[in-house]
Image (spheres, rainbow, N blue to C red):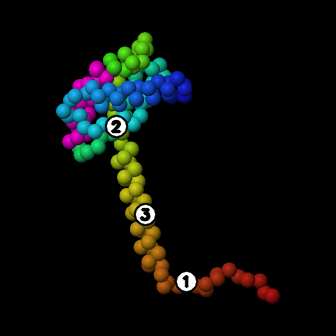
Amino acid sequence: MSNPRNAKLADQIRTILATTIDRRLKDPRKGFITITNVRLTGDNREATAFYTVLGDEAARTGSAAALESAKGMLRTAVGQQLGLRHTPSLQFVLDATDEEARHIADLLAQAQASDEATAALREGQQFAGEADPYKKPLE
């Protein structure tokens, strides 16, 4: 999306989707959905909306089913509010940013614990040779 018009259009679509899901989607399977990002193709024919759901795996599956069943209504709302000649088709993708961030945080904590364990082993140890192994010039 190097075109500034596409970026502005994607932001408008994200706002429209978020308000429409919040106010007009009455599906009981819908959880607490947050639209995090929208990406458009170069010709503005297809929009991929990334979303997150607060809750467990059952809430994620229910929300995915609710979004899939309401895809036509959401596309109609986007088309009516934007007034484009061709309304982009919508695709909803679960945003895995939170899980990836959690995984990276766990890996960093593991590395820090490993460093602390290595530092604890190093306490009280001595060098195998002299403390200063470099030869010094004679004075």
**Mark 3 surroundings within 10 Å by alpha-carbon count, few (fewer than 14), some (14 through 19), many (20 or more):** few
Instruction: Give the image location of residue 138, x and y in percent.
Output: 78, 87
Say which amino acid is labelled 3: Ala
Q: CA distance from mark 3 to mark 2?
A: 32 Å
- Report whether residue 68 is seen: no
Labels 3 and 2 touching (C-beta < 8 A): no
Element class at badge 3:
helix
Q: To which residue does mark 3 refer?
A: 111
Q: CA distance from mark 1 to mark 2?
A: 57 Å
Mark 1 against mark 2, which lies toward the viewer? 2
- Report whether residue 139 is seen: yes
* Most distant residue in the bottom direction: 139
Labels 1 and 2 touching (C-beta < 8 A): no
* Most distant residue in the front direction: 23
- Which secondary structure type mostly characterizes the magenta part of the structure? helix
Residue 36 drawn in magenta: no
Q: To which residue does mark 1 refer?
A: 127
Instruction: Give the image location of residue 94, x and y in percent.
Output: 33, 37
Element class at badge 1:
loop
Residue at 23 percent of width and 34 percent of height:
30
Magenta segment range? 58-75
Labels 3 and 1 touching (C-beta < 8 A): no
Q: To which residue does mark 2 refer?
A: 34
